[in-house]
Image: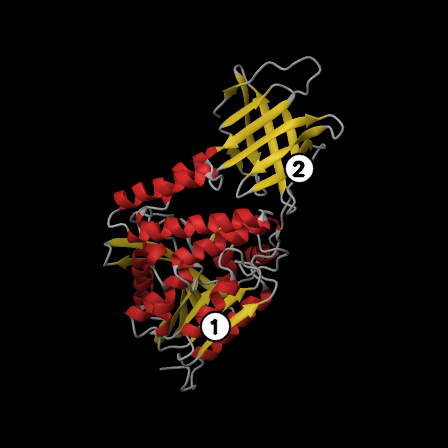
Amino acid sequence: MLTILAAGASAGAEEATGNWTGSLPSGFKVRLRIDKTATGYAGVLINPSNMETTLDTVTSDGTKLSFAVEKLGLRYDAAWDGGSKGWRGDLVFQGSHPLLLQRAAPGSMAARVRKRPQEDAIASGPRPYVERGVVFRNETAGIDLAGTLSLPEGAGPFPAVVLVSGTGPNTRDEEVDGHKVFTVLADALVRQGLAVLRYDKRGVGGSGGAYRGATTADFATDGAAAVRFLMAYLEIDPLRVGVLGHSEGGVIAPMVAASDPTVAFIVMMAVPAIRGDKLFVAQSAKVARLYGAPEAYVAGRQALDRELYAAVIAAPTAEAARAEAKTILARGVENKLVDAGEADSLAKSITSRWQRYFLAHDPALVLRGLKIPVLAVYGGLDAQVPAADNAVIAREALKDVQGATVVEMPGLNHLLQRAETGSPEEYVDIDETVSPHALELMASWMVDRVRTGDGAAVR
């Protein structure tokens, strides 16, 4: 942990060490632990998953408390309030939020025992299908990818679907905050007679290659390789192979279909339909509002982000983009829209190879060119890919695509879980991994598309 010298506490002042808790106006719970060191104080923030984020600075003289996490652009400044027996101040993170931190009650810092009933049911069995570990080659990238192929009981050839995960170094399970999304999804689909292939992303788990530096287009070649592998597999019907993608995987699915006319159908879960820069602006604003950020801050940050993303897209090189980003973010720091620590890390991350590609990519252009059945499913509470911004664009882009359906499911979040607000902070505390209604919708739609003897469903 990084530490900062703390001024000596005055007589009768409150000692900062210990466990502290408080709630933001949005209801999000803050948990903090501060420890005494030989030279001052150190501490950690503890998130709902019980993961710890080290505080870069912690200072206290017993009457005032300050701490910061530079990479998050987060800072807290407070004074001791004897009447409330707590530190009363403001937490700066995507706006300024009043926060009273009080000593944690015994047991309140412990992580909640979380249940995963869908995954527990799968683990306890029985499973009416077989699973095989497989390895397939992406000749374009010159790498081998590892995955799991789930096959229904009985004789094939079976219709099949490739699962493509969202942003991040995901394994074949697509684990998000303790939820194995693709484990649950694969189980539901194979029980309906579909073979399912899910795989570790390049550079992750058992897959070769490098994750860092790869773009959405690179990941699309991995998905295309998975499709080719399935079509050549003895127990798979090559005329009934589709692709299902979640989030960024939903962007990849139509890219794979556009490059391979033999793909039979695609399903897109919580898919961005607007260009990447517009998505990030909408996403940031929705999350900021969920944290209770003032509208003045949200509007100012949106304007800054639009300018930033436009400059990054227009820049001829990553170096030029980084220089432009630093200039724009410096103004954001002056206007108290961006913390200095966030500005430094954002200038680097926003100009990465993946970010520059994603910011400029317009998924709607690919959707318009599709000629196969498409299902797009959105959660009405999704804060990461807001349905209000994306579903309408998806409908417009797919209006001339025969067999295309766009569904918005009220009350569901980005993982298609039943949620209260849709905030990503809720994911870990929700027992459900994927809504049974969403699973049924997607499974029944795919079964209808691949039903043998249905001329509209089978090419």
- State the residue in front, 431 or 154: 431
| Alpha-carbon span between mark 1 and mark 2 | 49 Å
Please name the residue shown 39% across and 55% down the image: 277
Residue 170: image x %, image y %?
Answer: 42, 51
Residue 405: image x %, image y %?
Answer: 48, 75
Residue at image mark 2: 22
From the viewer's perspective, is 226 left or right of 341?
left
Q: Please, what secondary structure does the residue beneath circle 2 have?
A: strand
Q: Which kind of residue does numbered mark 2 sit on?
A: Gly
Of badges 1 and 2, nearer the viewer stands 2
Q: Which kind of residue does numbered mark 1 sit on?
A: Gly
Against 134, residue 317 (above or below) is above
Residue 184: image x %, image y %?
Answer: 52, 60
Residue 365: image x %, image y %?
Answer: 34, 69
Against 111, residue 68 (above or below) is above
Q: Quadrant of residue 394?
A: bottom left
Please name the residue shown 64% across and 25% down the image: 18
- State the residue in front, 212 or 339: 339
Against 456, residue 103 (above or below) is above
Residue 58 shows in the view: yes
